[in-house]
């Protein structure tokens, strides 16, 4: 069987592709296990300067596979608890994908090549940038199954578009076409379908070949700013400015010395 997550290296860019195209890349236990492993590997690999997440076929991710046959819980016991505890541990472990995409010290891009819904909007929201095809759509879908939302979706979209629009996305559950999603600030940039991959990789290579230490601390500042008090954010900016510029200068000097040698 083909792997349900494909991993490709393109220079310093790591491309992670959800690979269940016949299911619109819906998330079941197998693909979620492979996805969190691939994301963790990209986060710790020093050769990777930018991570792109996308879907195979005509869509990004349709959300959870409700017919995917999740692993049955074990009989309740002191080690694993009951059904609720086991379900929490299982889902929370898979949701590490979103934490890693958001917190890894390198830029992440969601290349949204078609419909995205449910848990997929959490994965897309976890990325720093969202480049979408004109055929892309955006749908929370959680209301359709009586669910509250997962994969960080309520956290990320409240931060990205504001509380008012986030409540509209979740409570009204309307499907947005790509132009509407761009206007609401959901997508960062919009491209013709045929140009999406090339344009996304152009930006990804620019980031991967850029000042990686600068981007590391820049992303740290942006993440801190989401939740910290203003004075705390200023403290971290001052610290990270020194760390980033010192690292960048030392890297530049080392490269120049190597050329001279």
Image: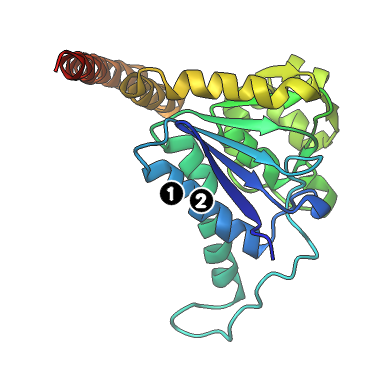
3D distance between C-alphas at marks 2 and 1: 5 Å
Q: Is any atom of residue 41 visible in this view? A: yes
Question: Would you name the residue on which mark 1 appears?
Answer: 41
Query: Quick check: marks 2 and 1 in contact, CB under 8 Å?
Result: yes
Query: Residue 114 falls in which quadrant of the image?
Result: top right
- Residue 161 visible somewhere in the drawing: no
The numbered mark at residue 225 is: none
List x then y, in percent, for residue 106. Answer: 42, 30
Q: Is residue 99 left or right of residue 154?
A: left
Q: Which structural element holds mark 2?
A: helix
- Badge 2: residue crowd in 10 Å (few <14, some 14–19, many ≥20): some
At 46% across and 25% down in the image, what residue appears? Answer: 226
Q: Position of residue 259 (x, y in %)?
A: 21, 15
In percent of the image, x 53 and y 48: which residue is there? Answer: 97
Could you tell me which secondary element the residue under label 1 belongs to?
Answer: helix
The reply, left or right, for residue 17 in relation to residue 233 is right
Q: What's the mark number on residue 38?
A: 2
Place of residue 243 in the rendered image (x, y in percent of width and height, measured from the top left)? 22, 21
């Amino acid at each position: 069987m083909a792997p349900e997550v494909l991993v490709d290296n393109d220079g310093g860019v790591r491309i992670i592709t959800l690979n269940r195209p016949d299911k619109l890349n819906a998330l079941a236990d197998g693909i979620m296990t492979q996805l969190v492993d691939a994301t963790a590997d990209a986060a710790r690999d020093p050769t990777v300067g930018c991570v792109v997440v996308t879907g195979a076929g005509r869509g990004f991710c349709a959300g959870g596979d409700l017919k995917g046959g999740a692993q049955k819980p074990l009989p309740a016991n002191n080690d694993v608890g009951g059904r609720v505890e086991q379900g929490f541990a299982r889902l929370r472990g898979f949701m590490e994908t979103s934490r890693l995409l958001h917190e890894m010290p390198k830029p992440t891009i969601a290349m949204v090549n078609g419909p995205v819904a449910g848990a997929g909007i959490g994965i897309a929201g976890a990325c720093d940038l969202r480049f979408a095809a004109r055929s892309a759509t955006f749908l929370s879908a959680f209301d359709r199954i009586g669910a509250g939302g997962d994969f960080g979706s309520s956290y990320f979209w409240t931060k990205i578009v504001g509380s008012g629009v986030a409540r509209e996305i979740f409570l009204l559950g309307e499907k947005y076409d790509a132009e509407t999603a761009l206007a609401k600030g959901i997508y960062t940039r919009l491209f013709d379908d045929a140009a999406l991959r090339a344009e996304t990789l152009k930006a990804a290579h620019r980031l991967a070949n850029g000042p990686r230490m600068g981007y590391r601390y820049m992303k740290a500042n942006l993440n801190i700013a989401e939740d910290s008090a203003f004075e705390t954010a200023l403290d971290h900016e001052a610290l990270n400015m020194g760390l980033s510029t010192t690292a960048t200068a030392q890297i530049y000097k080392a490269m120049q010395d190597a050329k001279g040698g």
